[in-house]
């Protein structure tokens, strides 16, 4: 073997010395765009350019892309944008799973206000440095992605978390951004609200203010995955899109077009649907499928509980939309957790605006059929949000940000208060004759309906399309008359009001009910019923639609019956036994005007947004079989010792 190797080597040496005799002629240079940029071209000159610099010399901004190193060596993709000439600028940071590159290129333009999301216009024009970063494991960032990555030491030691990543990012930014004044604020909605909250745990000294908007806080109790134990089916598509190929495309369920109501009903259980489309193979989906109850798996991931254990170090403005269709729970939950630490009542602010999910960052003149006085979102950003950041990041005078700022729908005005909730809980009872009254019924009774899992109540009029953004963003303000006439929906209504009823807080459901099955869901709605009179419509310049008789939902929530005695201890219901179901509706500031009525609706499904309850107790509803889905008679009790009511937080 050694001899053969020596021969081969000799042969190679011989060939090397003989190269001139055997060498191929060198190819002639080929014209390339770089070579001929200012020279002659031929018909065969290649036409492909390697890249185009979209930032032209006359652009009014500077954009930098950096791979920012974390303490464990992982580097995170980070985009930095500022106006040319920026000096001593504060940094406004967002940490996102939704593509920093795309976020910071809203349009192709030479203007900073056009490439950035609209919410940044006032900031970048005033010398702020806007930074958006991909969280680890997604899009341009290195590392492994874990959905809502738990805090180190909680729900298992992850080695790193979004708190340490925020700290390391801020540390790098203040050291490597010479145009900065060394002060950082963090802001973001939904998942970005979660990362904003995480930055407040063991915060970097340069983090001076935080504005978490509609943050994902507790995915089981009332944010994205479950509400009081009922699972939100559109989670499947989110998981497939978010956890495929670093969220760089290729995810999502290829369901095609059509009515999602029919599609989900035909599939069977949510577990069957996941298996049909292969989403059950996704690790995060398995986390859900294997953990349907509120065990430590979920409770130890609740961000409000983490924050309750931390000292309050960062001035915080918590923002949520009154009709937030995704994360109505998180901001009020965090407020309850950290407000007691605000002993001077000057470091924590709760804001509730008349918006959908993330609506604070977009246009706030309307929501569905509702019309507001001006652009409420832009007004809030200019009058409250920017002065808040200016004070802490630029040394501007104290704007005296109110402890609580809420928008009173019905009368369309911002209201500043010292605390939340403001109202006194007052029961609105369901009464005989399908009426509702602030007077407790003197006689006891119950009203019945049949809930049939084969014909569940839709959460919005059909056809249902989870991908229909217009339908999804406004379903919580959709006219409820589509449900009022169904035989499986109980409707209780007051007489026309002779004086306004103003509520400020979270209405509390106090429902006495029984089922002929062994499990059941309970959906309760509070609705503002408009007078059945005409007003000038679109033909007279009104951009909305006719509101005569409109049934405007003020709060809608669901509760899975098996958890009546504890969210961590599901159990079968006893057929015919009356149970007391207590749960909260979303926080609101609303005025029911004179001439309007207040309506309570009760039903047992909101499909296909929430998975169907088979109404037969099974250990794991995700694995329910077709035979488990059975119609049941549901009974709502009124009067006597079992007086069902919704307690309204009324301001006198």
Image: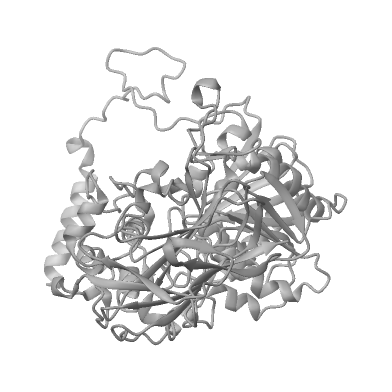
Q: Residue furthest right?
A: 397
Who's the residue at 47% across and 55% down the image?
A: 325
Who's the residue at 57% across and 54% down the image?
A: 322
Q: Is residue 187 above or below residue 524?
A: above
Q: Position of residue 9 (x, y in %)?
A: 19, 59
Residue 172 in sight: no
Q: Is 421 in front, or is 386?
A: 421
Q: Is residue 82 above or below residue 581?
A: above
Q: Position of residue 139 (x, y in %)?
A: 43, 53
Q: Position of residue 533 (x, y in %)?
A: 51, 36
Q: Which quadrant holds the C terminus? A: bottom right
Q: Is 17 in front, or is 426?
A: 426
Q: Is 425 in front, or is 222?
A: 425
Q: Is residue 360 above or below residue 283?
A: above
Left or right of 388 in this view: 16: left
Residue 467 in sight: yes
């Amino acid at each position: 073997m050694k001899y053969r190797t020596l021969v081969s080597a000799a042969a190679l040496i011989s060939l090397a010395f003989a190269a001139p005799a055997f060498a191929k002629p060198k190819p002639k240079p080929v014209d390339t765009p770089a070579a001929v940029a200012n020279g002659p071209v031929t018909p065969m000159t290649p036409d492909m350019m390697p890249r185009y610099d979209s930032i032209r010399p006359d652009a009014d901004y500077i954009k930098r892309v950096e791979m920012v190193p974390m303490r464990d060596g992982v580097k995170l993709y980070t985009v930095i944008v500022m106006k040319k000439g920026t000096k001593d600028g504060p940094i406004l940071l967002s940490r996102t799973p939704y593509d920093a590159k795309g976020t910071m290129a809203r349009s192709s333009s030479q203007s900073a206000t056009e490439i950035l999301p609209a919410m940044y216009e006032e900031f970048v024009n005033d010398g702020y440095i806007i930074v958006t970063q991909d969280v680890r494991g997604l899009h341009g960032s290195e590392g492994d992605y874990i959905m809502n990555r738990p805090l180190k030491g909680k729900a298992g030691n992850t080695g790193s978390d979004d708190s340490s990543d925020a700290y390391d990012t801020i540390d790098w930014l203040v050291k490597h951004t010479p145009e900065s004044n060394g002060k950082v604020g963090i802001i973001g909605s939904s998942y970005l609200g979660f990362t904003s909250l995480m930055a407040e745990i063991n915060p970097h000294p340069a983090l001076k203010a935080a504005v978490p908007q509609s943050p994902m806080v507790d995915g089981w109790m009332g944010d994205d995955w479950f509400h009081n134990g009922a699972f939100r089916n559109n989670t499947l598509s989110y998981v497939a899109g978010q956890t495929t190929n670093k969220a760089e495309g290729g995810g999502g369920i290829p369901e095609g077009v059509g009515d999602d109501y029919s599609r989900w009903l035909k599939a069977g259980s949510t577990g069957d649907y996941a298996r049909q489309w292969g989403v059950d193979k996704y690790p995060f989906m398995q986390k859900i499928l294997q953990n349907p109850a509120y065990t430590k798996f979920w409770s130890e991931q609740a961000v409000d509980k983490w924050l309750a254990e931390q000292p309050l170090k960062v001035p915080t403005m918590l923002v949520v939309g009154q009709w937030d269709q995704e994360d109505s729970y998180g901001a009020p939950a965090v407020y309850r957790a950290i407000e007691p630490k605000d002993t001077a009542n000057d470091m924590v602010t709760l804001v509730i605006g008349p918006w959908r999910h993330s609506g604070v960052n977009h246009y706030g003149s309307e929501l569905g059929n509702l019309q507001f006085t001006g652009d409420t979102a832009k007004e809030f950003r200019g009058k409250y949000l920017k002065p808040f950041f200016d004070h802490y990041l630029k040394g501007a005078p104290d704007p005296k940000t109110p402890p609580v700022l809420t928008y009173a729908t019905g009368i369309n005005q911002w209201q500043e208060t010292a605390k939340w909730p403001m109202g006194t809980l007052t029961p609105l009872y369901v009464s005989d004759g399908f009426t509702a009254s602030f007077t407790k019924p003197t006689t006891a009774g119950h009203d019945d309906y049949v809930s049939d899992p084969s014909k569940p109540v839709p959460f919005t009029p059909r056809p249902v399309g989870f991908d229909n953004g217009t339908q999804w963003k406004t379903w919580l303000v959709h006219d409820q008359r589509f449900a009022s006439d169904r035989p499986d929906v109980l409707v209780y209504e007051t007489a026309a009001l002779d004086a306004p009823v103003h509520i400020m807080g979270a209405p509390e459901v106090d429902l006495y009910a029984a089922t002929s099955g062994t499990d059941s869901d309970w959906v309760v709605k509070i609705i503002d019923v408009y007078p059945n009179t005409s007003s000038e419509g679109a033909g007279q310049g009104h951009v909305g639609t006719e509101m005569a008789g409109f049934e405007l939902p003020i709060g809608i929530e669901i509760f899975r019956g098996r958890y009546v005695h504890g969210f961590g201890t599901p159990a079968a219901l006893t057929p015919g036994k009356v149970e007391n179901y207590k749960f909260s509706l979303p926080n609101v500031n609303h005025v029911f005007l004179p001439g309007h009525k207040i309506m309570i609706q009760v039903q047992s499904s909101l499909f296909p947004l929430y998975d169907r309850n088979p109404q037969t107790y099974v250990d794991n509803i995700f694995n329910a079989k077709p035979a488990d889905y059975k119609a049941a008679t549901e009974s709502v009790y009124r009067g006597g010792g079992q007086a069902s009511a919704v307690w309204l937080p009324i301001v006198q």
